[in-house]
């Protein structure tokens, strides 16, 4: 008989207490015992989507709250219910855990002064304040209210924003709204490049 | 995609151009294999390289990069010459019968309306003949009908000409043409799958249009198993294109306003399509104002009222193109002060990296929001750059990434899928939307405290979130969906949007994704129960997530049925008119749900265009109403069709316009054609931070045809220098038979393959060669998408 991966998993989950041979033709009890020892047993199950290409493979993520309150990510795998990927993943998706939790992350806001040869670690307050002041100064210096032909154009020519293909859609929408609200016209993401 | 990933299994023939799904979209590729295994579909892969896609295709056509218009043009010609097009479909659902004005002309590589000084066309000069009622005249027999002009235009694309331009041998081309020609039968359907191998050209838009024209001729647009399907390379590039992180659009593909539009009426008149047939629904054009006013209500709330044209003056009107190349061109000119980058590294991703590095060093400030260091956050100490000489102030803000926040991703098939927050932010990382919200509030505070230029829109922008500095994505999703402002209830369809200020919608194409009943992108009725969850058996799975618009799974699906509403292929229905129930059944119809198609005056099938039909001829593009083959800007030959107008006459030449040195090479100095591409194990540049993936593909290389390697004395693993007019790579050679020589217009031409993924940031330090150091700073006339995929290089053994 042919079994899909999902049916196989269900078989393991629903045949608890069954005696004798399963439809697979062998005793599932030892396999079940192994499953019971899996590290995802009792873990929280969350649903997410692969962060790489735009196939949109659905992922299942298993987490457990550690004694110290931190959340450990135990496992990421393809979601067997998805009509898009039916549980399958490519090498990138299959290694998504290594992107999710990494010692290589930038630990805190960093600032590099003009001409400096190194970063300086700074507070979020400093970084956000600096950015806000830069935006206002550049906006004020490069804002055009009326063009040479006398048209009202209300645009900021000296600031550009690029990015967004890794944003959640709602973040991207907010980015568009905020940038247009500031009068930014140079707006771009990965669609062209 | 017009269709969606799972739908590809419904195809009989799969043309793959400018894409390598087996390696770049492996899990999506399963649906192409399912079509092959389950229904005996054939796969034709036209690509410069023999890849893993080619390995399982029925035919691999070794094609010269950038010549796909000639390939598709040859197929269009074959289909027309042999009368293999789907006649009923073409008559009913395309503009084939529309009569074009007699000013239309194509001569020696130029269409009418060309201005050689400005290097632009006047696209309005490509127009239909209209009657006194303002509607376009139709007469398919007229010598100037779109169909007849098309026959004339593509007559030149003979199998011999296709071979001269593309390098595909005539007999091989004709075998494929025969297969493609069969797809004009109503009981057959073909899909075209493409990726950035088609878009990344100075002719990118027309490369895609030529495929779309072929699909319309064969009657394959709107049908399950058909369509034009872009694979797309980033998890949410679709969602954030929809939400308009793009200079030329506002959310929902509304055009950005232009200078000279003084009010909403000017804007709508110049932006919306006009009704060109009495029975054209012209849904988009006729509702444009409602979508725009609802957007302005979402953004400016009570400050957007009829008396001030719904705050139309608050919207910025760009002077000219403001896309990727323009940003860095402005920086090189010293006019761009600040740049914010999020999840996108300019240094690696843009063309002509050395010029981009110069551009970044001319900024006053750069802010990088990312989870990891990037080649942009570190650009000031890139190899060969003296940090002391770089006066750019740089901020690096650690952002959370996908798994540390919720929100939706929209895949290539337009399916918006909600994801849960799995992990709390690592370390000090903050969400991008919190960074943006907080910075915006601080800018707003500054405008409240100090004078400044035109502060009104900054002060008036709505932030109706419980904590304006920390909005939730759920709150924003509701804003995107939109409200009936009178009742305060969320709308279930954009049909409820109004232009009197009584509704709001942040992005009309997403209206209905979050009605009062809840967030539909969270739905999970998938393959755990196919009988229940896929009621039509066509793989639509309407209860899994939500797809725009209105949960429609196949765009333009009215064209999947004939004029009477009967599916062209009853075995593979998209939608069907049910006379008993007096409604359309199947997929969510791309048509009024109860419009009886058998009644006189029933609306034409393509409700989004002014014509009411698909467009074989279009004036919506900058470089011609019919796709025409032009050589890449850097090419080994003159265009055999019209040598005096070899490359596109309308590409904007940034360096020339700015008075910078010419950065284009010629085949005398750079004799080999190069193309860039991606590997399975990497995604652009971020995977340089992932151990397993760096182990799998640790270092940069170039792929060199075995025959060329032999000529050059290069062995597998040798270090080689690949150089263009703009820069160089010094990397290892992978000598392979996957690439081979082509005969192009009587000349032997070699192509070299260059994966893009490496830089000077990542686990494997020292691998600092940027593939885009080689690529040219020039883009498509319509989209300004850079020509990453076809340029000239030299090759030397080191």
Image (cartoon, coloured by chain):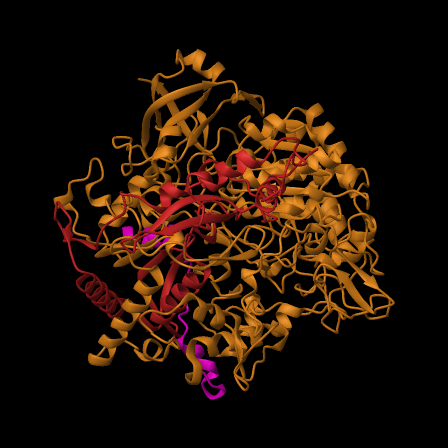
Chain colours: A red, B orange
Magenta-tinted stretch: B304-332
Q: What residue is drawn where x is 68% and y is 43%? A: B191
In the figure, is residue A154 to the left or right of A112? Answer: right
Image location (x, y in percent) of residue A169: 46, 60
Looking at the rendered image, the quarter that the C terminus of chain B falls into is top left
Q: Main structural element of the magenta stretch: helix, strand or loop?
A: helix
Decide: is B336 above or below B230.
Answer: below
Residue A167 sits in quarter: bottom left
Q: Residue B258, position in %: x, y?
A: 46, 68
Q: In x, y percent, where is residue A34? A: 48, 36
Residue placed most toward the observer, A92 or B205: A92
Along the line of sight, the residue nearer the viewer: A94 or A192: A94
- Residue B179 image point, x, y percent: 75, 33
Q: Which of A160 and B685 is in front in this view?
A: B685
B404 drawn magenta = no
Residue B108 visible in the shown view: no
The structure residue drawn at horizontal position 53% and vertical position 34%, both measured from the top left corner, is: A30
B104 vs A104: above or below: below
């Amino acid at each position: 008989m042919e079994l899909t991966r999902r049916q196989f998993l269900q078989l393991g989950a629903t045949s608890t207490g069954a005696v004798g041979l399963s439809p697979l033709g062998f005793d599932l009890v030892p396999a079940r015992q192994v499953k019971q020892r899996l590290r995802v047993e009792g873990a929280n199950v969350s649903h997410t989507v692969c962060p790489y290409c735009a196939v949109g493979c659905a992922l299942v993520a298993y987490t457990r709250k550690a004694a110290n309150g931190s959340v450990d990510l135990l496992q990421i795998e393809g979601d067997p219910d998805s009509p898009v990927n039916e549980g399958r993943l490519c090498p990138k998706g299959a290694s998504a855990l290594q992107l999710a939790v990494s010692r290589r992350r930038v630990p805190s806001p960093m600032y590099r002064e003009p001409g400096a040869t190194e970063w300086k670690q700074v507070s979020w307050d400093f970084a956000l304040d600096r950015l806000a002041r830069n935006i206002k100064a550049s906006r004020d210096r490069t804002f055009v209210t009326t063009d040479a032909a006398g048209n009202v154009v209300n645009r900021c020519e000296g600031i550009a924003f690029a990015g967004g293909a890794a944003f959640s859609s709602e973040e991207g929408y907010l980015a568009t709204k905020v940038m247009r609200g500031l009068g930014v016209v140079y707006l771009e993401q990965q669609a062209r490049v | 995609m017009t269709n969606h990933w799972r739908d590809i299994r419904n195809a009989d023939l799969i043309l793959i151009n400018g894409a390598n799904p087996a390696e770049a979209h492996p899990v999506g590729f399963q649906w192409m294999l399912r079509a092959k295994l389950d229904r005996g579909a054939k796969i034709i892969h036209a690509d410069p390289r023999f890849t893993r896609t080619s390995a399982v295709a029925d035919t691999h056509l070794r094609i010269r990069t950038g010549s796909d218009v000639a390939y598709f043009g040859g197929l269009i010609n074959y289909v027309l010459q042999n009368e293999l097009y789907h006649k009923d479909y073409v008559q009913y659902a395309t503009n084939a019968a529309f009569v074009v004005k007699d000013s239309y002309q194509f001569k020696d590589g130029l269409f009418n309306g060309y201005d050689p000084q400005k290097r632009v066309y006047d696209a309005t000069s490509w127009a239909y003949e209209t009657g006194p009622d303002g509607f376009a005249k139709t007469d398919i027999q007229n010598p100037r009908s779109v169909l007849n002009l098309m026959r004339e235009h593509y007559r030149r694309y003979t199998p011999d000409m296709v071979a001269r331009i593309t390098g595909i041998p005539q007999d091989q081309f004709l075998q494929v043409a025969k297969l493609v020609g069969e797809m004009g039968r109503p009981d057959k359907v073909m899909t075209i799958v493409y990726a950035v191998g088609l878009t990344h050209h100075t002719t990118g838009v027309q490369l895609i249009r030529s495929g779309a024209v072929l699909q319309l001729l064969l009657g394959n647009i709107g049908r399950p198993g058909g369509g034009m399907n872009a694979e797309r390379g980033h998890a949410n590039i679709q969602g954030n294109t929809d939400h308009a992180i793009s200079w030329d659009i506002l959310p929902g593909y509304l055009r950005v306003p232009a200078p000279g539009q003084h009010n909403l009426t000017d804007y709508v008149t110049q932006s919306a399509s006009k009704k060109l047939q009495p029975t054209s629904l012209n849904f988009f054009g006729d509702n444009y104002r409602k979508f725009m006013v609802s957007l302005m209500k979402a953004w400016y709330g009570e400050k957007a009222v009829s008396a001030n044209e719904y705050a139309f003056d608050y919207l910025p009107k760009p002077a000219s193109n403001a896309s990727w190349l323009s940003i860095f061109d402005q920086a090189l000119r010293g006019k761009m002060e600040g740049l914010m980058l999020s999840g996108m590294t300019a240094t690696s991703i843009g063309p002509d990296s050395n010029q981009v590095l110069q551009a970044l060093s001319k900024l006053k400030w750069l802010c990088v929001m990312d989870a990891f260091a990037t080649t942009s956050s570190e650009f000031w100490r890139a190899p060969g750059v003296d940090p002391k000489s770089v006066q750019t102030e740089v901020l690096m803000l650690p952002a959370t990434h996908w798994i540390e926040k919720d929100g939706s991703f929209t895949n290539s098939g337009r399916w918006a899928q909600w994801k849960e927050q799995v992990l709390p932010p690592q370390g000090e990382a903050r969400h991008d939307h919190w960074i943006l919200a907080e910075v915006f509030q601080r800018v707003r505070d500054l405008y409240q405290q100090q004078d400044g230029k035109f502060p009104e829109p900054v002060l008036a922008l709505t932030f109706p979130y419980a904590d304006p500095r920390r909005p939730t994505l759920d709150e924003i999703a509701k804003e995107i969906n939109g409200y009936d402002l009178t009742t305060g209830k969320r709308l279930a369809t954009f049909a409820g949007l109004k232009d009197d200020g009584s509704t709001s919608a942040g992005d009309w194409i997403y209206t209905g994704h979050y009605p009062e009943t809840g967030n539909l992108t969270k739905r999970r009725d998938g393959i755990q129960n196919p009988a229940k969850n896929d009621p039509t058996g066509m793989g639509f799975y309407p209860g899994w997530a939500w797809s725009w618009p209105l949960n429609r799974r196949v765009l333009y699906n009215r064209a999947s049925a004939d004029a009477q509403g009967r599916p062209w292929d009853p075995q593979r229905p998209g939608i069907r008119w049910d006379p008993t129930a007096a409604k359309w059944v199947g997929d969510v119809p791309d048509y009024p749900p109860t419009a009886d198609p058998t009644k006189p005056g029933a609306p034409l099938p393509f409700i989004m265009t002014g014509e009411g039909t698909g467009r074989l001829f279009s004036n919506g593009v900058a470089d011609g109403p019919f796709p025409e083959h032009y050589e890449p800007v850097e090419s080994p030959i003159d265009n055999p069709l019209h040598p005096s107008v070899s490359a596109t006459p309308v590409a904007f030449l940034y360096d020339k316009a700015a008075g910078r040195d010419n950065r284009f090479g010629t085949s005398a100095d750079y004799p080999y054609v190069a193309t860039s591409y991606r590997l399975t194990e990497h995604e652009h540049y971020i995977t340089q931070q992932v151990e397993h993936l760096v182990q799998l593909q640790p270092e940069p290389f170039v792929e060199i045809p075995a025959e060329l390697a032999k000529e050059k004395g290069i062995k597998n693993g040798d270090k080689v220098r690949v150089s263009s007019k703009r820069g160089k790579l010094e990397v290892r050679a992978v000598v392979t038979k996957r690439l081979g020589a082509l005969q192009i217009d009587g000349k032997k031409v070699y192509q070299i393959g260059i994966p893009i993924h490496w830089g000077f940031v990542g686990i494997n330090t020292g691998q600092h060669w940027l593939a885009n150091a080689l690529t040219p700073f020039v883009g498509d006339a319509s989209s300004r998408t850079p020509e990453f995929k076809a340029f000239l290089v030299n090759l030397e053994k080191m």
